[in-house]
Structure formats: structure tokens, C-alpha cells
Image: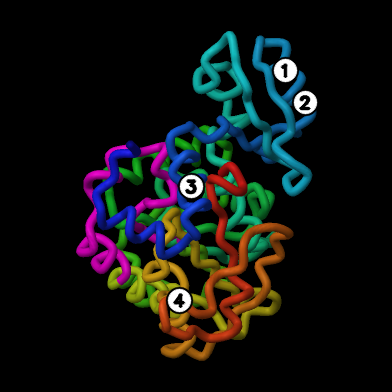
Amino acid sequence: QYGYVPFLVELFLQLFPPAEAIEFLDANEKPRPLTIRANTLKTRRKELAQILINRGVNLDPIDKWTKIGLVVYDSTVPVGATPEYLAGHYMIQSASSFLPVMALGACEHERILDMCSSPGGKSTHIAACMKNTGVLFSNDANEQRLKATVGNVQRMGVRNCVVTNYDGRQYPNVCSTFDRVLLDAPCSGLGVISKDPSVRLQKDEGDIKRCAELQKELILAAIDCCDANSKQGGVIVYSTCTLTVEENEATLDYALRRRHVKLVDTGLEFGVPAFTRFRGKNFHPSLNLARRFYPHIHNM
């Protein structure tokens, strides 16, 4: 009744007990809430909310875990075409995409890399955390997709950003003195099926394997780009928008074995602890510090 290839159904049943798997599949049938991030380089959430309410937008703060997010219930005007949107007072982005940037903990005057940055939602959020100080490198391997990043960087009033077009795996040769690196890795996208229903029929085991191979190379490159002697940094955040253990826990476990790094607490006050063992495979015990976020539990 849900229209998935058998391989994916099997995968979901390995991740969840049957009743929860049904909840997950049901959640994928409904769109996630429309959320926006107030751009603190230009406005405050309270002011933005008032202006948008006056324009006919029905909204609320997302939740107590974010001071900059708003959820839009309905609107008499197109949210992606208001004067405030065009002037860069907010970004339309999923609530889940706030979380990697919050975990990154960017500070003013730092040097930060967003390795796979397009379309720039997380990069512009990082720049706001840095208050336009220091320098932010927003990279993407795909030149076409970088156009969106450049557009968003300019619209949002970001002035501390260099946009680069390299294969992330080569980035240690470009620069390896970053205080913090965000690797929001290319993935199979199984966590955002409500956004892209075509995934249900297209993904197979080969896709997941290919993604996992690339992610392993990228995470080592991200670590090698980061300066271990950074005063308060030396932090790498790895995030995906997928559910598979191969692309998440297994990738982290690989990095822990290949590089002199340790997992630290995300600082996020919710989320499901990652797997420390899965189908007979044991991962490093510190993986319980990593966090999973699900559409059927967190509605993001």
C-alpha cells in the first residue's frame, strides 16, 4: 500500500520494530511542516514573525530548542516571494537542517569549512553564528548546485564567505587549517522520502554502498582539513539525511578507526541515540553520543 521496492521495506524492518516501521511509513506519506529560519544577520525572530503575521502568514516558534526557527501553518502570500524573503530576512529550510549547525557550535573569528554546502541553508546559518566575522568556506563538488549557494549567500547578507568548487576528497590539499568542518554528506536520502517520493522505487543496495564508500573518503578528508591545535575548535560534524546504518554509524566507526579522533556529545537535547550494535556488528561504544532524528518521532 505504500509503494516501496521490497529491498527498502526489508531495510526499514531491520531498523524498526514492525509497529514503528508502520509509523515511519505513515509519516512519509505526509509532508513535514514548512519551517523557516530567521536570519540574525538582518532581523530577529520576534520582529520577523510580527511582519509576516501582518502579511497574512499563520506561524509559531518551532519549539523551545531553537530561538530562530518558525513553523508556517498556512499563508495568504507565497512564503518564498515576500519582500522579507527577497531581502534575506529568512531562509526556508527544514527544522532538521538546523541541527548540524547547532552541533557545530561556530564561534566568531573562526575559520570554518562547509564541505558539501549547496544550496547554502547551513552555510548561511553558520555565517549568522559567526556574525559575519572570521572566514567561512562554502564548498560543493557540483558547480551547477553552487549557483544556489552563491544566490543565498548574497541574499542573506553573508560577507565572510568564500565559495569554492572542489571535490571534497581533495580539500586537504586546498586548506587544512580549519577550526571546524561541517560534512553534510551526499547520501541515499531515505530520511526525506516525504520530500522526494521517487526514492521509494529507485534506491537499491548499490546506491547505499556507493554513498557509503564516498562518505568514508569524505569524512577522512573532513578530519584532515581540521586543525587539531585549534584553540576552541578541532570539531567536525558529520550529518546525513538518510537512515541506513552503513551511511551513518558505520561511517563514524570507520573514521574512529582510521584517524586519531573521538566522538563528543552533540549538545542537542533530543534525538535517539545511534546504534552501538546492529545485526551482529558492534560499533565503538561512544557511538551512543551520536543522534538520530526521525520523521515519525520528531516530525522533521
Task: Tell me if residue 90 comes above or below residue 256 in the rendering.
Answer: above
Q: Is residue 125 left or right of residue 67?
A: left
* Disc nearer the start of the sequence (3/1): 3
Query: Which residue lies under the disc numbered 2?
Result: 47
* Disc nearer the start of the sequence (2/3): 3
- Which element carries disc 4, helix, strand or loop? strand
Q: Is residue 128 left or right of residue 146?
A: right
- Which element carries disc 2, helix, strand or loop? helix
Residue 233 lies in quadrant = bottom right
* Disc nearer the start of the sequence (4/3): 3
Amino acid type of the residue that numbered disc 4 sits on in the rendered structure: Phe
Amino acid type of the residue that numbered disc 2 sits on in the rendered structure: Glu
Residue depicted at x 69% and y 60%: 268
> Which stretch did the figure color magenta?
184-212
Residue depicted at x 30% and y 57%: 141
Callout in the foreground (4, 2): 4
In what quadrant of the picture does the N terminus appear? Answer: top left
Task: Tell me if residue 248 comes above or below residue 41 in the rendering.
Answer: below
In what quadrant of the picture does the C terminus appear? Answer: top right
Q: Is residue 190 magenta?
A: yes
Callout in the foreground (3, 1): 3
Q: Which mark identifies residue 51?
A: 1
Query: Which residue lies under the disc numbered 3?
Result: 24
- Contact between marks 4 and 1 (CB within 8 A): the answer is no
Q: Is residue 297 left or right of residue 40?
A: left
Q: CA distance from mark 4 to mark 2?
A: 47 Å
Query: Which residue lies under the disc numbered 4?
Result: 278
- Contact between marks 2 and 3 (CB within 8 A): the answer is no
